[in-house]
Amino acid sequence: MKLILKYLKPYVLIVLAIVALTFVQVQTELTLPDYMSKIVTDGIQYGGITDEVPLAVTAKDLELITSFMNEEDRNMILSAYYPVEKGTAKTIDEQEIVFKEDVYLLREDYLFPADVPDVKQTMLRPLVYAYLAKQNGLDTNGDTVAVMKELDAQMEGLEDNFTSMAKLYISDLYTSVGLSTQKIQSSYILSSGMVMLGIAAIGVVVQLLSTYLSAKTSAKVAARMRRDVFEKVESFSSSEFSRFSTSSLITRSGNDITKVQQLIQLMLRMMLMSPIMGITAIIKVTRYPGISWLLVVAVGVIICTAIILVIFAVPKFEVIQKLTDRINSIMREFLDGILVIRAFNAQKREEEKFEDINRSFRKTDRFVSIVMNIIGPVMTLVMNGLTIAITWFSARLIDIDAMTIGEMMAFSQYAIHVVMSFMFVTVMFFMVPRSLVSVRRISEVLDTENTILDPEDVAVLPDENGTLKFEHVGFRYPGAEESVLEDISFTAEPGETVAFIGSTGSGKSTIMKLIPRLFDVTEGKITYCGLDVRDVAQSQLHEKIGFASQKAVLFSGDILSNIEFGREIPEEQIRQAVEISQSENIISEKEEGLHALITQGGTNVSGGQKQRLSIARALAQDKNVYIFDDCFSALDYETDKKLRAALNELIQKTKSTVLIVAQRIATIRNADKIIVLDNGKIVGEGKHKDLLKSCKVYQQIAYSQLSKEELA
């Protein structure tokens, strides 16, 4: 997680904005059930009546209500209303009414009952008495005390529902006055619905903004991470590459970073929203203590299921990533060697090898998929069971007027939000460990320490060419028990051509790789212009060297882009490099010339053409040192001869140093100095004629290729 937090640090303000937007979104979502409850209860059940004290009441009804009060309360209530005579027109609750009988209207300073609780509390029980007396047809003209005793017996245990009965009676009172309760109801439902739509709209906008910011942030983090991985891999020396296979690096920079991107988006959305929604919804459901225990049972089932499934699934996540690496490795090997496989009719063998790993991947992935998909049916069962349980137990509470239908619906919505929050947490139980495997794999690449680094105090190479010198150089590959090179010492002066020859595995290519510091020597030192190459910045050293590797590599693009290779090179230099490398006929054969398409890996040109174009790339920019690591092997003798002649002319003009590794005697016989290697040691050094006399290894190589007459 440190890696993710590190990459999220530049976006801390955006993350805080996402947190704020998520909080607003949750609050809007959890506000809607309250409005829905009010619409069902107040809007439908009570006909839109929200007043707990009637705004208008007929003189006859007010007399009935006050008959259930003592003298002091009666006087207080009568003082809260003022009389209006029959035939008077008034606007009440946006309705124009002409009263058909004498009425009493609540004074303006009493229009908000919450501000005058004495009136509300004083009228509540008398309103209920009057309502029940009318419902039961009781005679209130006689002894009201007897009526109250009879009604008290009926209302025993129903004190919590006095407000609902009072609202029902107020609805009747408004009808008696002449108010249209249908209009009151429609107005209430419409206004509440508009508020709900407004809140929902805010929630949608906030959710869209939050989703956009989280997607944008996660994409930016993934892009930065992918760039850093690419740059890190680009800085690897061969010793670092030996730790990671090519297929593994491809998987880490692609599949693994995609999983990290998904994790970041999950963190910025679900991991933020789940706790906020869960906590807020739990606070809401505590208002319903009678049935809130149902949530405890449902959440307990979800958590237990998640823990069990995580125990089985999490260990398999890393196995899947390793199997993915293996599949990529086999596929890469298969595609690179498809021609050889067909030539040896080995398709069946490759199919069996691929099927073995594919079968292992399929079994592991299927197991994980089955385990992860179990949570879906469990969640469906829990949510449906919870809905049934809420309906069952709420029905009993509604039956005794301890809960309204609107409250039951609101509780159901809150319960679903709580369950969904825990479901998101359950999903994270699976996603986070799986993604953390990818995070760890990416960290392994980024945290790998390069063995070849620039020094703190960088020495500066002069512009002119200088002496290249090996002083008792020894080299051992990382992890190897034996040295590849031992006590290698030689000097290459400006304008000299130094050739290297020897049997396979004698260390020729290794020497070439030590010069541009693709590896660092383990013993001795290499100096150029009198400076140890380890004291020089790698970029500056590489600017001095033109390198044509043993394996000719071309990149997708055209011929010109492969020769320039990201550099701005004058047309004259490109033409010269093409001529020296004998690549003119390659270009002339193409209709597009230098702009002829080159496929990835140069699969649409021959091996000899690839070598000539890679040589042209090395020669295209003026360099002080040119290294040709056995890159003439695919050239025919005539082309080889012409290339060497043109190269000698270039050396005479530029006084560049040329190092050639070759297997052909004909390629190196005219070199100023030939170094013969055997088992990592120099066994001969000198010109062609001298080595024919003094070096047995050189003699064996020479006589195996040419006759004595040809060597003379």
Image: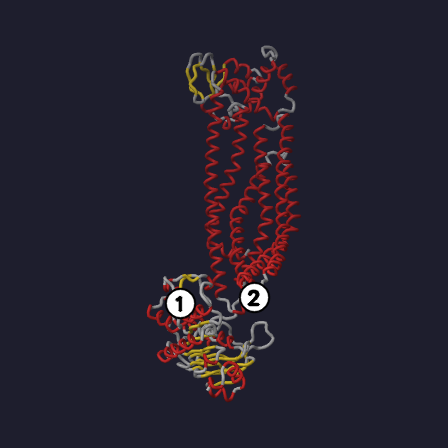
Quadrant assignment, res 586: bottom left
Between residue 477 and residue 309, name the one nearer to us.
477
Residue 348 image offset from top left, x and y in percent: 61, 59
Classify mark 1: helix, strand or loop: helix
Residue 392 image offset from top left, x and y in percent: 65, 30
**Disc nearer the start of the sequence (1/2):** 2
Between residue 367 and residue 35, name the one nearer to us.
367
| Amino acid at circle 1 | Ile
Query: On the rendered structure, is 248 left or right of 400?
Result: left
Quadrant assignment, res 283: top right
Please, is residue 550 above or below residue 170 in the view? below
Please, is residue 625 above or below residue 233 in the view? below
Residue 520 image offset from top left, x and y in percent: 51, 74
Residue 142 image offset from top left, x and y in percent: 60, 10
Q: Residues within 10 Å of mark 2 (few under 14, many from 20)?
A: few
| Amino acid at circle 2 | Arg
Between residue 255 and residue 509, name the one nearer to us.
509
Q: CA distance from mark 1 to mark 2?
A: 39 Å
Question: Visible in this render: residue 603?
Answer: yes
Numbered tag placed on residue 243 in the rendering: 2
Question: Visible in this render: residue 290?
Answer: no
Query: On the rendered structure, is 100 left or right of 380?
Result: left
Tell me the residue at 57%/31% (across/down). 409
Q: Nearer the viewer, mark 1 or mark 2?
A: 1
Q: Quadrant of the N terminus?
A: bottom right
Tell me the residue at 57%/19% (across/down). 126
| Circle 1 residue | 586
Please, is residue 629 above or below residue 266 in the view? below
Between residue 21 and residue 249, name the one nearer to us.
249
Classify mark 2: helix, strand or loop: loop
Q: Residues within 10 Å of mark 1 (few under 14, many from 20)?
A: some
